[in-house]
Image (cartoon, rainbow, N blue to C red):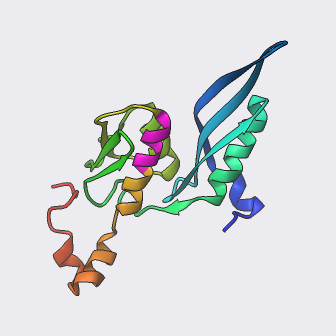
């Protein structure tokens, strides 16, 4: 599902990492660039993309296109996530915990960019193992994909909504 031009104007775009790689030829080095970016609407939708090109602007443009195509929906409740979760990808492990209102985004640069793009205002995060930006992004997205809204859990367990939300991430 590709966003319409009107929706694309409102998207938050964050560049997470730009990498320069060199290929050695007989005449010298040839440089290419890869860009890792995150795109979000600030209201629960976010995506990431990796673009590669001989020039930085082209790599960023390609990455933004991929990020817009691969957006996921994240349950955001009162500016935070519904429950604690751990996401893993490769050697990266990311812990996400909901925070009471006023906590802010306590996260490193890579995870902070994702949280800002998705619209989460109160969360505590920790990268436990690898801090490789590519793997941290993928681990964070795995964690965000595993999040379940209280409505979904209540429906799955055949319970009332009030019975499910007891003591999980809500301010006391």
Quarter assignment of residue 112:
top left
Camera-side residue: 23 or 76?
23
Camera-side residue: 46 or 17?
17
Kindly identify the residue that appears in the image at 23 percent across and 87 percent down.
158
Residue 10 makes an appearance in the image: no
Residue 129 position, x and y percent, is 30, 34
Q: Is residue 16 left or right of residue 25?
A: left
Quarter assignment of residue 69:
bottom right
- The stretch in magenta equals 133-140
The secondary structure that dominates the magenta segment is: helix
Camera-side residue: 124 or 64?
64
Residue 48 position, x and y percent, is 57, 49
Q: Quadrant of the C terminus?
A: bottom left
Kindly identify the residue that appears in the image at 52 percent across and 61 percent down.
72
Kindly identify the residue that appears in the image at 68 percent across and 47 percent down.
64
Q: Within the magenta stretch, is there residue 127?
A: no
Q: Is residue 172 left or right of residue 151?
A: left
Q: Quadrant of the N terminus?
A: bottom right
Q: Within the magenta stretch, is there residue 137?
A: yes
């Amino acid at each position: 599902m590709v966003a319409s031009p009107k929706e694309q104007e409102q998207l938050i775009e964050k560049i997470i990492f730009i990498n320069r790689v060199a290929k050695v030829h007989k005449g010298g080095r040839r440089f290419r660039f890869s860009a890792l970016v995150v795109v979000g609407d600030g209201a629960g939708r976010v995506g990431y993309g990796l673009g590669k090109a001989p020039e930085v602007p082209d790599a960023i443009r390609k990455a933004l296109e991929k990020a817009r195509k691969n957006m996921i929906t994240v349950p955001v409740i009162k500016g935070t996530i519904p429950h604690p979760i751990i996401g893993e990808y490769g050697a990266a492990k990311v812990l996400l915990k909901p925070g009471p209102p006023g906590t802010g985004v306590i996260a490193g640069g890579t995870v902070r960019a994702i949280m800002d793009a998705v619209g989460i205002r109160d969360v505590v995060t920790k990268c436990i193992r690898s801090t490789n930006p590519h793997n941290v992004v993928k681990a964070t997205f795995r964690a965000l994909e595993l999040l379940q809204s209280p409505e979904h859990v209540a429906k799955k367990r055949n319970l009332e909504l009030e019975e499910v939300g007891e003591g999980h991430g809500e301010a006391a």
